[in-house]
């Protein structure tokens, strides 16, 4: 396993300078579940990898970072997978105290999509570590590849709470738990709770900590207007209107450590941010190609609604410009993407 860890580390280092790609499901002309398409921002081009999950049927991705994906198999067992060189590293199975009991097949399928909120791969001193946020309470657990076990950090999060952990030491330590919170006035002044919800991301940027709030409408019509659920079915129609959830706005805040307050960020300067099911990234446009500065690139990680309707899900990806607040969504606004798109940095061979 230590040898596998060294292989993982060397591959990841070769990937850090490249522009992220967006991993998409197989296109309509190819029904193979093992085929994936990758959209290159730098080249404005789509690549296709066939038999990508050869030997790994019916996997579900729960995170991507440094060119690696963290996926769950049919029995909710985790493993690392590099789609570009087909490398695979098995992770220890989740212990009983971390994983709910597995019953019917339907339950397992639903469990895979909500059990792990996010998984991140970290490389520290040639050692590979995987950290997961799991369960209803958004608890933390991690494993080191050289040890065949998961360690629960016993840190059940309260709604809206923030914690920062240092994984550079042999055992992680919590170094900060800011008490500061963003005023709900900022969140809901123009976005009532019955029509919108907020998805938040923590992003390290130039040594500072950013809070990125993504405001999403539960039901958004083709004109971009959020509507109430009861408006979807009117008496003239026998079928409800199709109004998928859709991202409407991003707000960015930076933590003032001394004052323990969040200050709104009006500009990212020459930085860009990538958020979604992937490892949240803040990158310099000087290291990237064809990326616009002061822009947030987002993909769909709305796990609670991604399978709510057979006509849509995984569709909510695009770009948001802080300069003017303009938002551009993917070409297929009302389509089903199974599995949802993920940002991933391609690893060079």
Image (cartoon, rainbow, N blue to C red):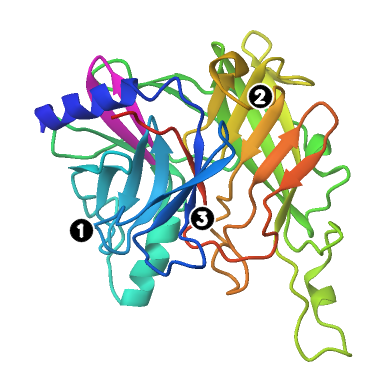
Is 192 located above or below residue 182 in the figure? below
Residue named by callout 2: 180
Q: Spatial distance from mark 1 to mark 3, Cα to Cα? A: 21 Å
Is 6 located above or below residue 28 in the figure? above
Q: Earlier in the sequence, mark 3 or mark 2?
A: 2
Quadrant in the picture for residue 327 = top right
Q: Spatial distance from mark 1 to mark 2, Cα to Cα? A: 47 Å
The quadrant the C terminus occupies is: top left
Was residue 339 drawn as part of the magenta stretch in this picture? no
Residue 119 in view, yes or no: no
Residue 293 at x, y = what percent? 70, 22
Q: Give the mark toward the camera: 1 or 3.
A: 1
Magenta segment: 120-132
* Front in this rendered view, residue 339 or 98: 339
Q: Earlier in the sequence, mark 1 or mark 2?
A: 1
For mark 3, give the secondary structure: loop
Is 27 located above or below residue 268 in the figure? below
Q: Give the mark toward the camera: 3 or 2.
A: 3
Residue named by callout 1: 55
Q: Spatial distance from mark 3 to mark 2, Cα to Cα? A: 33 Å
For mark 2, give the secondary structure: loop
Residue 11 in view, yes or no: yes
Quadrant in the picture for residue 115 = bottom left
Q: Is residue 55 left or right of residue 268?
A: left
**Residue located 52% across and 32% down the image:** 280
Was residue 122 drawn as part of the magenta stretch in this picture? yes
Residue 66 at x, y = what percent? 38, 29
Residue 297 at x, y = what percent? 63, 36
**Residue located 25% across and 43% down the image:** 86
Residue named by callout 3: 340
């Amino acid at each position: 396993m230590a040898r596998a860890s060294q292989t993982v580390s060397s591959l990841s280092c070769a990937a850090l300078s490249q522009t992220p790609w967006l991993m998409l499901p197989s296109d309509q002309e190819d029904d193979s579940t093992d085929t994936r398409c990758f959209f290159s921002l730098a080249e404005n081009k789509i690549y296709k990898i066939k038999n990508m999950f050869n030997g790994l049927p019916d996997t579900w991705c729960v995170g991507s970072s440094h060119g690696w994906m963290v996926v769950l198999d049919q029995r909710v067992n985790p493993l690392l997978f590099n789609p570009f060189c087909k490398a695979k590293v098995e992770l220890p199975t989740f212990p009983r105290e971390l994983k709910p009991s597995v019953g019917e097949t339907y339950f397992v399928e639903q469990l895979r999509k909500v059990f792990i909120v996010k998984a991140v791969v970290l490389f520290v001193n040639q050692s590979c570590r995987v950290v997961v946020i799991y369960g209803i309470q958004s608890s933390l657990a991690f494993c080191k590849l050289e040890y065949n076990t998961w360690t629960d950090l016993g840190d059940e999060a309260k709604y809206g709470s923030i914690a920062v952990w240092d994984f550079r030491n042999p055992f992680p330590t919590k170094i900060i738990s800011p008490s500061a919170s963003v005023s709900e006035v900022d969140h809901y002044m123009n976005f009532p709770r019955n029509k919108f919800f907020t998805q938040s991301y923590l992003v390290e940027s130039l040594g500072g900590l950013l809070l990125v709030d993504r405001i999403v409408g539960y039901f958004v019509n083709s004109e971009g207007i959020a509507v109430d659920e009861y408006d979807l079915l009117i008496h003239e129609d026998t079928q409800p209107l199709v109004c998928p959830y859709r991202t409407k706005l991003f707000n960015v805040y930076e933590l003032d450590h001394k004052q323990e307050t969040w200050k709104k960020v009006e500009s990212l300067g020459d930085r860009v941010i990538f958020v979604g099911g992937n490892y949240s990234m803040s990158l310099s446009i000087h290291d990237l190609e064809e990326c616009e500065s002061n822009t947030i690139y987002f993909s769909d990680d709305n796990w609670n609604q991604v399978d709510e309707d057979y006509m849509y899900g995984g569709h909510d990806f695009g770009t948001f410009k802080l300069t003017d607040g303009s938002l551009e969504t993917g070409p297929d606004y009302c389509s089903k993407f199974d599995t949802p798109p993920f940002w991933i940095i391609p690893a060079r061979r």
